Amino acid sequence: MKLLVCGGAGFIGSNFVRQRVVDHGDAVTVLDKLTYAGREENLADLRDREGFAFVRAGIEDADAVAQAIDGVDAVVNFAAETHVDRSIAEPDAFVRTHAVGTWVLLEAARAAGVRYLQVSTDEVYGSIEEGSFSESSPLAPSSPYSATKAGADLLVSSYFHTYGLQTVICRGSNNYGPYQYPEKLIPLMILNALHGDRLPVYGDGMQVRNWLYVEDFGRAIGHVLEHGAPGEVYNVGGPDECPNIEVVKRIIELTGADEGQLEYVTDRPGHDRRYSLGSEKIRALGWEPQVDFSQGLEQTVSWYRDNPAWWEPIRSGDYREYYERQYGSKIKD
Ligand SMILES: NC(=O)c1ccc[n+]([C@@H]2O[C@H](COP(=O)([O-])OP(=O)(O)OC[C@H]3O[C@@H](n4cnc5c(N)ncnc54)[C@H](O)[C@@H]3O)[C@@H](O)[C@H]2O)c1
């Protein structure tokens, strides 16, 4: 297969591209704007592979997209602003990328007559106290991040119904694993734990997430691309649910950090209490997660411990300013 992978230099996108190039022998063009979260270093091992190409551009750039889409079989769109805290402080880029960017990609896919897969999130359903969301649950997003992602999903579905574009949507639960930018809970806590920094937990830490190892999500997206039915949505939930405070305590154990580093901080406004996805539909299609949370978390801690060359430039760059603004304290050198 020949794929155009948008946002392929970010966390999930780069893991997905690695699977497609190495395990499936696909030719992949990555189109990525390289925002603070996207890094070419995430794809460094693939740079010299035959069939791999990288284009630096935004998905809202219609000319760049039209060139990059030429000759591909399908478009997979990961490109997004992904941090809820940033969407609360500065929603502009979320609207631009999720609304305008998705529209530009859909138009290009329509003109080229190629399949289109949108990568989406469980956050579009909002919070659920008990049970799990199915693909037909109503969308009830709480943050500018999830609201603009929900808008993008609706636009994608409209292109199936209105123009017959062959679309599929994959809604994943919270991902974790290698190459995740340290503003997100798990890498933030791992790096702070390893450095002896405080471990800031929002509110009471009882927000429950349905953790999905990034390689399992990549396999699900590949599976839906090959076997999914046009016009359908597939939920991709992880095998385990765990409250944030429990995640942090497990990281403390795995890194040998001190429980005294834990600090409860003011909760995020509109913070969803619990996400949970029912994944029966994609399981019926033949996918299931292979990595449970204990194993995945151990692998993730080892990866961050073994790859300081990946995170040192981040922790010593603009991220420090973001961190100070967000948590009102400094991280150690
Ligand atoms: N991280 C999660 O837990 C999770 C869970 C479910 C779904 N998702 C979805 O998966 C996708 C990828 O998430 P991630 O965690 O890898 O995010 P990320 O922030 O690590 O990566 C996003 C990538 O998109 C690129 N990008 C941003 N705006 C762009 C634009 N306008 N044009 C081109 N490229 C642009 C960035 O440079 C970066 O490489 C997103 O759509 C997100 O909503 C994430």
Image (tube, rainbow, N blue to C red):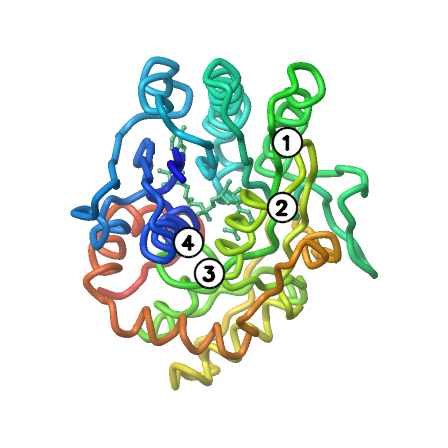
Identify the residue under disc 4: 183
Considering only vertical position in the picture, is 116 above or below 15?
above
On screen, residue 268 versus residue 274, left or right, reads: left
- Dot 1 or dot 3, earlier in sequence: 1
Residue behind mark 2: 171
- Closest to the camera, between mark 2 and mark 4, is 2
The answer to whether 120 appears left or right of 333 in the picture is: right
Give percent across and percent down for residue 63: 34, 13
Q: Position of residue 175 (x, y in %)?
A: 52, 57
Looking at the rendered structure, the kind of residue marked 3 is Glu
Tell me which numbered mark, 1 or 4, is placed earlier along the sequence. 1
Circle 3 residue: 215
Asked if the residue under mark 1 is in contact with the one under mark 2, i.e. CB atoms within 8 Å, the reply is yes
Query: Closer to the N terminus: mark 2 or mark 3?
Result: 2
Of the pair 29 and 138, the residue shown nearer to us: 29
**Ligand 1 position by quadrant:** top left
Foreground of the two, 75 or 304: 75
Give the Cα distance between marks 2 and 3.
15 Å
Categorize mark 1 by other alpha carbons within 10 Å: few (<14), some (14-19), many (20+). many
Q: Is residue 166 visible?
A: yes
Q: Which residue is mark 1?
A: 153
